[in-house]
Structure formats: C-alpha cells, structure tokens
C-alpha cells in the first residue's frame, strides 16, 4: 500500500530536549511538507522540501530543523529553542510542489 | 501570509438537507485553490484543486465553485449524510507565495 507514515503517534518532550518526528512516504513524491496545528488555527507550514537535499522555511520555522537526505524521508526535529512545541504535527507530500498534497496520520507532541 | 477566511466556523445540518460554506481569499496573484476534507481521527484528504475563474468541480454529492476575481469559493454538499461530518479546509496558493495557506476550516456535523 502506498502512503505516508508518521511516527510516533504520541511523543513526549522534556524541557530542553530535542525530539525528532519521523515522516516516510513510498509514493515517489518529490515534495514533502511539515505542518503544525494548534486549536482554533489553520494548518501552518513549518518547512517544505521540493527535492532531495533542498528545503525551505515555511511561516513558522523558528525552533525547528529538517533534513531531506532521501526522497522518501523528511524528519522534523523540534529543538529546545521551540518554546511552545505542544501541538499536532502533520506531514504531507505531493508529486511535485504545488500539486495535491497527501497527508500522514500525524504526531501529537506533548511537553512534560 | 495570505488572509484566508472560512465561514461559518461550524455548522449542524440535518441528514438529507443540503448545505454550503465559503472560503474567502485575496484575489490578487491567485494561482490555485485546494479543498480538503478532514474527518476526525483520519488524515486530511484532498477534494478539489481549482485554478480557473468560474471553475466548477464535482465529486459525488460534493461540488465547488471558484470566483478568482472576487476571491471566494463555495463548497456545496447535496443531501448530507452522516459520513459527510468532517472539517472542510480550503487553501489558496498565490504567485509569489510558494505554499498553501490554510483557512481554519468549517466544521460540519450531520444530525441523523
């Protein structure tokens, strides 16, 4: 089955800790995206990547980092610089940038 | 960041009734508009991608129209069914703004 997987489903972060959220796709899509959802707000773009070894900041990139070493993988690291990391994180991919996006099931990050 | 407004925020509709809701966005530099449906405990799922003024798209009982000159799109659901209960998100894409900007969504609940 082709699709996007995210792990873990729930993640707990301690103060001052970096954590990494996994996103994998086997759709052979070039573009991948990370969004954050907070209550009462629309999905906000954190980072996106149009092609391997290239990525751009979205609207709320501060406190986050990404890498795109493989076409199928786009991990997101929430660093200790992100002061309010509690949110629901969605990963998405599209055949190419600007086309229909396909979303993963999401990871909920909570701070202990 | 584009200003995207969806109305109403939430809506309760009797099963069998038809309904519609609105997405408003800046009309300048318009490139495309995406509609997604997000059911509880699932991933957002693409409904339509619309690009041309006057465009109408249909998928089963759901249809959408687009007015790029005045900056709005309507989503219609005919003969609502319980499975239509979801949050409906719109996301325009503008030239010079190389990413989707999501609205906060319309949360639709179908009352059996």
Image (cartoon, coloured by chain):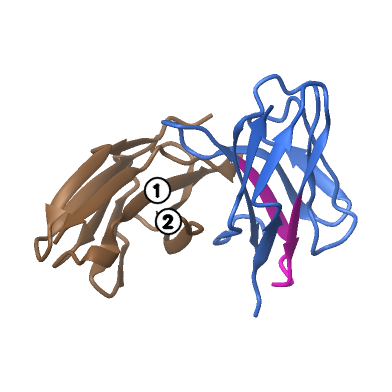
- Colour seen for chain B: brown
The residue stretch that appears in magenta: A22-35
Q: Chain of mark 2?
A: B
Residue A34 included in the magenta stretch of the image: yes
Residue bearing mark 1: B89
Residue bearing mark 2: B36
Q: Chain of mark 1?
A: B
- Colour seen for chain A: blue
Q: Is the residue under label 2 in contact with that under label 1 (CB below 8 Å)?
A: yes
Residue B111 included in the magenta stretch of the image: no
Q: Nearer the viewer, residue A7 or B90?
A: A7
Image-based side of A63 in relation to B26, left or right = right
Q: Quadrant of the C terminus of chain A?
A: top right
Q: In the picture shown, does residue A63 fall above or below A68?
A: above
Image-based side of B57 in relation to B50, left or right = left
- Label 2 secondary element: strand
Residue A71: name its quadrant.
Answer: bottom right
Point 64% across, 33% down: residue? A110
Residue A88: name its quadrant.
Answer: top right
């Amino acid at each position: 089955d082709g699709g996007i997987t995210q792990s873990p489903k729930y993640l707990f972060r301690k103060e001052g800790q970096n954590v990494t959220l996994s996103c994998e796709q086997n759709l052979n899509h070039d573009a991948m995206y990370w969004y954050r959802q907070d209550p009462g707000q629309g999905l906000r773009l954190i980072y996106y990547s149009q092609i391997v070894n290239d990525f751009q900041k979205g609207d709320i990139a501060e406190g986050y980092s990404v890498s795109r070493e493989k076409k199928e993988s786009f991990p997101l690291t929430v660093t200790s610089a992100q002061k309010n990391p509690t949110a629901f994180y969605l990963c998405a991919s599209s055949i190419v940038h600007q086309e229909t996006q396909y979303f993963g099931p999401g990871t909920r990050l909570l701070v202990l | 960041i584009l200003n995207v407004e969806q109305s109403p925020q939430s809506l309760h509709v009797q099963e069998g009734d038809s309904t519609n809701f609105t997405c408003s966005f800046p009309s300048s530099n318009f490139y495309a508009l995406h509609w997604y449906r997000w059911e509880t405990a699932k991933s957002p799922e693409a409904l339509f991608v619309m690009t041309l003024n006057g465009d109408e798209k249909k998928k089963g009982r759901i249809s959408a129209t687009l007015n790029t000159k005045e900056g709005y799109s309507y989503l219609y659901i005919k003969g609502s069914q319980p499975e239509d209960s979801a949050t409906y998100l719109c996301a325009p894409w503008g030239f010079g703004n190389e990413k989707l900007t999501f609205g906060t969504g319309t949360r639709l609940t179908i009352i059996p």
